[in-house]
């Protein structure tokens, strides 16, 4: 089960469907979570690489590339989508054309 502490200050709970979890839970998971927390997102991204969870996680990792888990999820998403950029060394925040918010 994902850590309840990642749901502080939001109106969602770990028992709610993952598709309903807000942006703040994704960001908190990347910053404060670890493998047991990340596996919920990774499993959903593997199940539906272009779904809501994958798209929201993709937004979070590009907006917050310095969070602890961002690089891991960049790889998870690209592996699930079989993106060629994963194997070419592209990571958010390291692309010369990357423009942060």
Image (spheres, grey):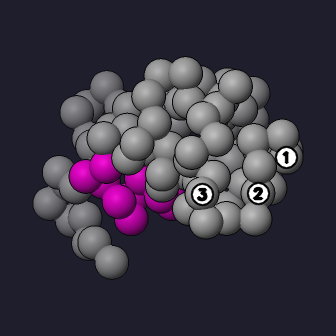
* Residue 16 disc label: 1
> What is the C-alpha distance between the residues marked 3 and 2?
9 Å
Say few, some or many: other residues with alpha carbon within 10 Å of mark 1 (under 14 / 14 to 19 / 20 or more).
few
**Front position in the image: 86 or 52:** 52
Dot 2 falls on a residue whose secondary structure is loop
Evaluate if marks 1 and 3 touch, with contact meaning CB atoms under 8 Å apart.
Answer: no
Instruction: Determine if the magenta segment contains residue 59.
Output: yes
Write the residue at 76% across / 57% down.
Answer: 12
Residue on which the image places disc 3: 8
Q: Are marks 1 and 2 in contact (CB under 8 Å)?
A: yes
Residue at 75 percent of width and 65 percent of height: 11
Of the two numbered discs 1 and 3 in the rendering, the one whose residue sits closer to the viewer: 3
Q: Quadrant of residue 96?
A: bottom left
x and y percentages locating residue 4 in the rendered image: 64, 41
Residue 8 image point, x, y percent? 60, 57
- Residue 53 lies left or right of residue 96; in this view the side is right
Q: Which residue is mark 2?
A: 12
Instruction: Tell me which residue sits at (52%, 36%) in the image.
Output: 77
**Disc 3 to disc 2: CB gap under 8 Å:** no
At x 56%, y 30%, the residue is 37
Label 3: few (<14), some (14–19) or many (≥20) C-alpha neighbours in 10 Å: few
Element under disc 1:
loop
Ranked by sequence position, the earlier of labels 1 and 3 is 3
Toward the bottom, the furthest residue is: 101
The answer to whether residue 53 of the structure is visible from this angle is: yes
* Number of disc labels: 3
Q: Which residues are magenta?
A: 55-67
């Amino acid at each position: 089960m994902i850590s309840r502490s990642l749901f502080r200050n939001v109106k969602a709970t770990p028992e709610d469907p993952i598709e309903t979890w807000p942006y703040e839970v994704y960001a908190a998971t990347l910053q404060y979570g670890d493998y047991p927390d990340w596996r919920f997102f990774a499993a959903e991204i593997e199940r539906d690489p272009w779904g809501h969870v994958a798209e929201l996680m993709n937004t979070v990792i590009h907006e917050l590339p310095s969070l602890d888990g961002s690089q891991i999820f960049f790889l998870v998403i690209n592996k699930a989508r079989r993106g060629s950029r994963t194997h070419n060394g592209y990571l958010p925040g390291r692309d010369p054309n990357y423009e942060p918010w």
